Image: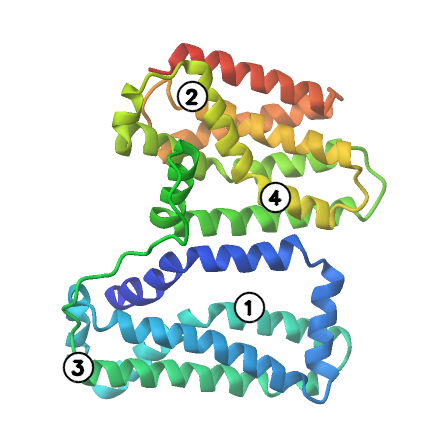
Amino acid sequence: MKVLLLSTVREFYRQRAGFFLVVIFILFGFLTGREHYAFAHFFLTDEWGMSALLVAWVAYTLLCAQFLAHQLTRPEYVILHSTFLWPPWKRMRRLMVMALGFILPLIFYGIYVLTIARQENILKRTWPIFPYWLLLSLVLVAVAEWRLRNPDIATATKIAFRLPFRRPANFIFWTLEWLLRERGFTLLLSKAGVFLFMIAALVYDSTGTYDLRLPAVGFTLAYLLNAGLSYELYRWENEIWLWGKSLPFGKTTRFGRILILHAILLLPEAFLAVSYGTRLEWYELAQLYALGVSTLLLYHAQLYRRQLLLEETLQTVAIGFIILTLVILYKIPVALLALILLSGAWLGWRRWYG
């Protein structure tokens, strides 16, 4: 069962991580809570609302079905065809669990629609959601069963993805391309967690009149959830792209590239803060963004001090967050704090990089 889920559901989210990142960026970067509520209200109250919801869900299910049918024909996953050794009902049950894993985004959105319906006292209009879940799951089960019965294992060489433009000879582009292709699942999970924490901080900030310290504490915690991505950048340069260290670039140039990479990684959070943080002025949002970039840079710089696993650096992240929280609460200006952290990152980089 574990092999089945890892080979299908996990691979789907890993390989489609870029797609989900774009969807999350659109849903939370450009649409506010009012737009989300309006869409849910449309699905619940309009005559064709549930039909429109079904069309959108069917399109997503077809995407999953196409991936599943292709995945089960790949030679490296031929072991999955041994599932026919399971009894029929056991196989159907496990394929249903697999199908539910594919439609998890639809289940989460359905729960959101149910929550809105409960608030509006129109729960009786939500009855099609449950048959939709069952129907779409059965479609994926049928596709998997059909492909397992008709394997037709593909032996052709895998066609590599080609960019529609000439690949730039640029370190930043190569790094981001590698991060999206090889660490897409990590990128997706990190951004999903960051968005949840940032939305929670912004929602709490909107409940009263607070100064910049409250969002600064909440945003700092959210930004530190990107520590895993910063660690992947460290591994890229020190374990994978080793020949890059032999190139004739000074420490200042290398630090500038790492600074730009971290600034790009935090751009989705900046767009989210602009969309939801309507109470905050642009210069306050700029201070929070600078605080996030400088905090991550300081974490990244200390990785060069000694080689540690990601799990071993979490204690440093926790202690750093506690110290930053205390410093922020002592009314030190956020802009000044960001400048201090950036200076510390630069000094640490010059001392430990090598």
Q: Is residue 278 left or right of residue 348?
A: right
Q: CA distance from mark 2 to mark 3?
A: 54 Å
- Label 2, label 1: how far apart the Cα atoms are: 42 Å
Q: CA distance from mark 1 to mark 4?
A: 22 Å
Q: Amino acid at mark 1?
A: Phe
> CA–CA distance between discs 1 and 3?
31 Å
Q: Is residue 137 visible?
A: yes
Q: Earlier in the sequence, mark 1 or mark 4?
A: 1
Q: Residue at x 58, y 19 (%)?
A: 341
Identify the mark nearer the N-term, 2 or 3: 3
Crowding at mark 2 (Cα within 10 Å: few <14, some 14-19, many 20+): some
Neighbour class for label 4 at 10 Å: few (<14), some, many (≥20)?
A: many
Check disc 3 and give the amino acid type. Answer: Phe
- Asked whether disc 3 touches disc 4, contact meaning CB atoms under 8 Å apart, the reply is no
The residue at which mark 1 appears reads as 108
Residue corresponding to mark 3 = 84
Question: Residue 143 location, x and y as percent?
Answer: 32, 83
